[in-house]
Image (cartoon, coloured by chain):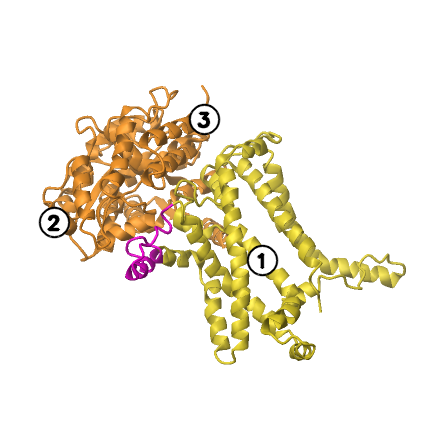
Amino acid sequence: MKHFTKLLATAAVAVTTAFPAFADTTLTVHYPMPGFFKDVMDTISKKFMEENPDITIQFANPSATYEEGIQTIMRQAGTSEMPDLTFIGLNRLRMADERGIPVDMGPLIQNDQNSMAEQGFSDTILKLAQVNGKQVGLAFATSNPIMYYNADLVKQAGGNPDNPPKTWDEVIALGAKIKALGNGVDSIDFRWQGDDWMFSALLFGAGGTMLNEDESEVTFNGPEGQKAMEIIDRMVKEAGMPVFTKPAGEQAFVAGKVGFAFQTTGALRNTIKNVGEKFDLRTAEIPLIDPENGKLPTGGNAVVILTKDEAKQDAAWKFAKFAAGPYGASVVVPGTGYVPNNELAAKSPEYLGDFYKENPLFQAGLKQMPRMIPWYAFPGANGVRVTQAIVDNTSRVVDQSATPQEALDDAASEVKRLLPRK
Amino acid sequence: MAEVIASSSPSPVSVRAIPRSDADRHEARAAWMLAAPAILLTFLFIILPVCAVVTLGFTDFELGYSGFRFVGFENYAELLNDRTFKQSLWNTFIYAAIVAPVSIFLALGLAMLIEAEGIGRSFFRTAYFLPVASLIVAMATVWQYLFHPSIGPINALLALVGIEGPNWLGASSTVLYSLALIGIWQTVGFNLVLFLAGLTAIPRDLYSAAEVDGARSAWDRFRLVTWPMLGPTTLFVTTISVINAVKVFETVKTLTEGGPNKASEVLLFTIYQEGFVYLRVGYASAMTVVFLLILIVLMFVQYRIQDRQVHYT
């Protein structure tokens, strides 16, 4: 079936290239997760073509997930099938760069110095899509982890929904009270499954790091990591957090059976849709173990230029800037719940200024923007596998088959084995 | 289906006859030409990919890098010490050991019940076949809801009779059994239809003859007539069930992602992770070779053991 759709896609591409458009340049754009991004992409490309009549945008067959997206690109890299631009998950940029796939945007930015700042690309935002100082892309859709809560359950448990918990201690205490309501109600759904992003949220929130500066030593099992893992342990021990699979947690929360959910702000639009009128959904900033210096990992993706053809690169750069720029952000944010990756878009009433006033649920992610640092990507061939070692060991704490200390030590020794030897 | 297997038994047609006359040679050439498309396609889509996988298994190829190096048996040596791979082998074994026999015997029992009942036969046949015809990824989401620890109907029913339901897919102690349950649900219908076909093919007079010969009880008739006559069908059903159970993937990918802590990691899922998420195609190919070998050995053993006891009519 997959081969068939691929065949269709190549046939479609062949047909479109056989009848050249009247525009001077045609860019092929590939993107993942059509469920989130299809409408957004259509809107952005339409507007872009209106403003740049000499460039035509056509879309390659989108991939269902970030993983599938990057596989497709890697298979097509260096062949004529390779699209000119793609969108890659922020934690996969390093892997793509190690394989020499993205075009270095550094020189392009250099030529464009003035307009970059004007268009709201601050240094913090540029850093999100850098690998070892090399600009491999521009952050397109960015997210941070926030706290979702069920105001009805909080009220029933004696909490004040207008003044949500600010520390993990308060979350756990209120969670325990919500659990005590009975009737199949659970306290917390902490999205630890799938990847190391939410563990990073606790670790970075405590001021910790995954590895040391020169990436030779594992540091996530240090004091900050221990505090992070202990929070998860206490969610289970004190607040009775159950072992949810990812979809089970989502379902239980939107069904009104869970007090707090901690996950990406990118899921906000979908959560609002799924909750409907069932209960009073609210959001707030995620608590930080170290409220002073705590940081948060950035999820999402970046637009990456692939084409090595110089004439095309100019057009591709225009599109990348446009998609990641203030107009792009003003389409992505309301459509998904991601936070603006662009400072101009966030503040200017021309773009999103008014949107935030009218949609308070979206503000939690916005307020946390100054804390966002890149989602750490481990070096070497086993970079992705390392994250699985962390997830597996976190799950041992959640199902209480290991103490936080044991889980951290095991994770650290597994990760050490998987890192490249220096 | 019984016929399909019957035809694989030694037949008097000899294909290796040496052509002697012009007519013979002509016939042989025509035969080759007629078989050519099938041979070509088998070569292109079966032999060639298998060769490619075996070759890649000896390299360190990673998706995205242009070149690769031959590393001999390094991948296989790594497999021996790979905790995930061992766990996934063991989980696959447990899963198959539950799903294959249960789905075979359950299907046989149901088939005999349906066969014995005159009315509603086609209704039951259709009802049990529905899971086979449905899309397993879509059905997996339904199961995920049924198995939901707090809002799922199964645990709600259990709560009615005062039992606290387990955390089916969430707990590492139960996840594999929950998946096996879904696996059984999925395979029983298919096996049932095969057994039904096998049952209808048994001549009625054999039962009368057995009764005359002193097989009075239902069990005797089953033991002496039904079971031996179903031999070819059972062999086929067993083969298919075991292969399907070892090949479990969709439910794991959609429901558990191999978790928690690798408790539901199965072979195909591990191969998928290595090859397509970690992009280590060389290593994943080595795993695939092991996977293929396991299937081949299983089939070989099964045919050796069962073939001796199967009577083809």
What's the residue at 80%, 64% (across, down)? Answer: B12
Residue A240 in view (yes/no): yes
The residue nearer to you, when weighing A116 against B155, is B155
Q: CA distance from mark 2 to mark 3?
A: 48 Å
Amino acid residing under circle 2: Lys
The residue nearer to you, when weighing B9 against B179, is B179
Crowd tier of the residue under label 3, counting other residues whose Cα lies within 10 Å: few below 14, some 14–19, many 20 or above: few
- The answer to whether residue A377 is magenta is no
The residue that label 3 is drawn on is A417
| Label 1: element kind | helix
Q: Which chain is yellow?
A: B
Crowd tier of the residue under label 1, counting other residues whose Cα lies within 10 Å: few below 14, some 14–19, many 20 or above: some
Q: Which mark is residue A155?
A: 2
| Label 3: element kind | helix
For chain A, the rendered hue is orange
Which comes before the other along the chain, label 2 or label 3? 2
Q: Residue A96 location, x and y as percent?
A: 42, 33
Is A287 above or below relative to B187? Answer: above
Query: Disc 1 vs disc 2: Cβ atoms closer than 8 Å?
Result: no
Amino acid residing under circle 1: Ile
Q: Which residues are magenta?
A: B145-171
Q: CA distance from mark 3 to mark 1?
A: 40 Å
The residue that label 1 is drawn on is B240
What's the residue at 31%, 36% (across, down)? Answer: A197
Is A337 above or below relative to B221? Answer: above
